[in-house]
Amino acid sequence: MPKTILRLPAVKSACGHSHSTLYLRINQGLWTKPVSLGGRTVGWPASEVNALNAARIAGKNDAQIRELVVQLETDRKLSA
């Protein structure tokens, strides 16, 4: 399965959050940190965006989402 990186406009569209809300969620531990693509360019793995959206749709609470974020970021480091 190819690994796709989504840039900010695509992530905002996928999750429905504004730029400021997305970064607030990152600071709250409710969204994964972006991946540096070089310079001032960042993006998010599409699989992480999909997993976080699926968790919200499934009705997971904030504590469960934080656990998922930790797991996704750990998996990201292990697969590098």
Image (cartoon, rainbow, N blue to C red):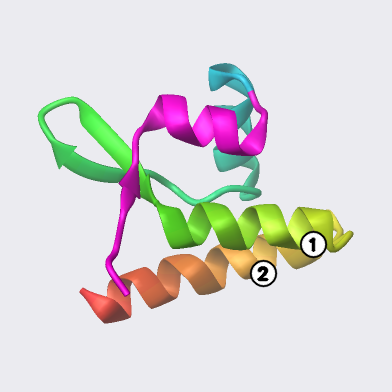
Q: Nearer the viewer, residue 59 or 33?
A: 59
Q: Position of residue 10 (x, y in %)?
A: 45, 32
Residue at 54% across, 28% down: 12
Task: Using the rendered image of the protein, determine whether residue 37 is visible from the camera's viewpoint.
Answer: yes
Residue 63 — which label? 1
Q: Position of residue 25 (x, y in %)?
A: 63, 37
- Which residue is at the far front? 1
Q: Quadrant of residue 77?
A: bottom left
Q: Quadrant of the C terminus?
A: bottom left
Q: Are marks 1 and 2 in contact (CB under 8 Å)?
A: yes
Residue at 65% across, 42% down: 28
Residue at 49% across, 36% down: 11
- Residue span colored magenta: 1-17
Residue at 67% across, 52% down: 53
How packed is label 2: few (under 14 Cα within 10 Å), some, or many (20 or more)?
few
Q: Position of residue 52 (x, y in %)?
A: 63, 56
- For the residue labelled by badge 2, is the local secondary structure a helix, a strand or a loop? helix
Can you say whether 41 is above or below 35 in the image?
above
- Which residue is at the far left? 39
Q: Which residue is mark 2?
A: 67
Q: Quadrant of the N terminus?
A: bottom left
Is residue 42 shown left or right of residue 16? left
State the CA–CA distance, disc 1 to disc 2. 6 Å
The mark tally for this picture is: 2
Q: Position of residue 78 (x, y in %)?
A: 30, 81
- Asked if the magenta segment contains residue 5, the reply would be yes
Is residue 5 shown left or right of residue 51? left
- For the residue labelled by badge 1, is the local secondary structure a helix, a strand or a loop? helix
Is residue 79 shown left or right of residue 48? left
**What amino acid is labelled 1 in the image?**
Ala
Residue 77 — which label? none
